[in-house]
Amino acid sequence: MKLTEIAELLNARVVCGQERLEEEQDIAFASDLMSDILTLGDNFPMIVTGLCTMQTIRTCEMGNLDIIVFVRKKKATPEMVELAEENDMVLMECDFSMFKACGLLWEAGLKPIY
Amino acid sequence: MHLEYTIVEGDFVNAGSASSSIKKTLKQLNVNPSIVKRVVVALYEAEVNAIAHAYGGKVTADIDAGTILLRVIDRGPGIPDIDWAMQEGNSTASPEVRDMGFGAGMGLPNIKKNVDRLNVQSTVGVGTTVEMEVNLA
Ligand SMILES: Nc1ncnc2c1ncn2[C@@H]1O[C@H](COP(=O)(O)OP(=O)(O)OP(=O)(O)O)[C@@H](O)[C@H]1O
Ligand SMILES: [Mg+2]
């Protein structure tokens, strides 16, 4: 699925990485636990999370995970956007709950890692 | 190549700066990306632990052709029972640390999975040294 379609589906604001929206993404992983996000080995899913801090960006940087969707109306701070830009990430902000966002993504055909 | 970084007490915002720098260095050395990821994930977990559970410290890295040897040395309360701490799910993280998305008790087991050799030494009331080695080829 194209990132632009994902943004539309989730009614999300793209706050960083607009130039990458034509890219395709087929797998996703949702968690609010940073160590959980670091157990994915050589899988590189889109991350759906309600944890919206500098650590979220850092953790994704460490894991080479560069597409992040914040749910539950979380907003990225300017510092977060800056670090995300340095790492060529795509950041989206979505007002839906984690359950609704994941449900919509699942229905649209995004695949889990396990 | 010998590198050193300071881990500042309580500085969660910069937790991961050593890992980030080592990531760039290993990339420049053309190390295989999945090996880089293993090194960086392990170092990051240890760096966060030195801030979340101790009062900061330092990271040293020694890189030669075949391996990277990392040491994360902190001043802190130490780990009374290392076997307990190594088990997935065990954590003494504070509510503040949990609010930042840490404290699942997955860090040390995750380090173990990612490195080729791990040695955790700890003295209660003094501090902890996590020594990790990864084969680069
Ligand atoms: N450097 C350290 N100094 C003191 N105690 C530590 C240190 N590192 C780990 N511990 C102890 O070991 C426990 C387990 O650590 P581990 O990294 O596995 O999980 P965590 O940090 O609690 O949570 P997570 O890593 O999933 O965010 C910690 O909760 C803490 O009690
Ligand atoms: Mg930890």
Image (cartoon, coloured by chain):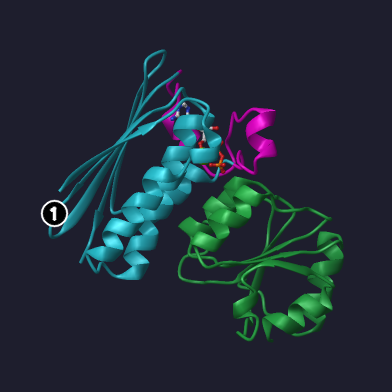
Chain colours: A green, B cyan
Amino acid type, callout 1: Asp
Chain at numbered mark 1: B
Q: Is residue B89 magenta?
A: yes
Measured as percent of width and height from the top left, residue A64 is found at: 48, 65
Instruction: Tell me if B89 is positioned left or right of A6 in this view.
Output: left
Query: Which sits in the foreground, B7 or B92?
Result: B7
Query: Which sits in the foreground, B111 or A55?
Result: A55
* Residue found at x 27% / y 57%: B25
**Is residue A86 shown above or below A46?**
above
Measured as percent of width and height from the top left, residue A52 is found at: 70, 50
Q: Which quarter of the rendering shows the C terminus of chain B?
A: bottom left
Instruction: Tell me if A55 is positioned left or right of B27 in this view.
Output: right
* Residue found at x 19% / y 55%: B67
Measured as percent of width and height from the top left, residue A12 is found at: 80, 69
**Is residue B57 shown above or below A51?**
above
Q: Give the range drawn in magenta.
A: B77-104
- Asked which quadrant contains residue B38, the reply is bottom left
* Residue found at x 55% / y 62%: A85
* Residue found at x 51% / y 31%: B11
Q: Residue furthest left?
A: B65
Disc 1 is placed on an element classified as loop
Total number of numbered discs in the rendering: 1
Q: How crowded is mark 1: few (under 14 residues within 10 Å), some or many (20 or more)?
A: few
Q: Is the magenta stretch mostly helix, strand or loop?
A: loop
Q: Mark 1: is the Cβ under 8 angstroms from ligand 1?
A: no
Query: Which sits in the foreground, B59 or B35?
Result: B59
**Is residue B95 shown above or below B112?**
above
Residue A64 seen anywhere in this rendered image of the structure: yes
Which residue matches tag 1? B64
Instruction: Tell me if B117 is positioned left or right of B89 in this view.
Output: left
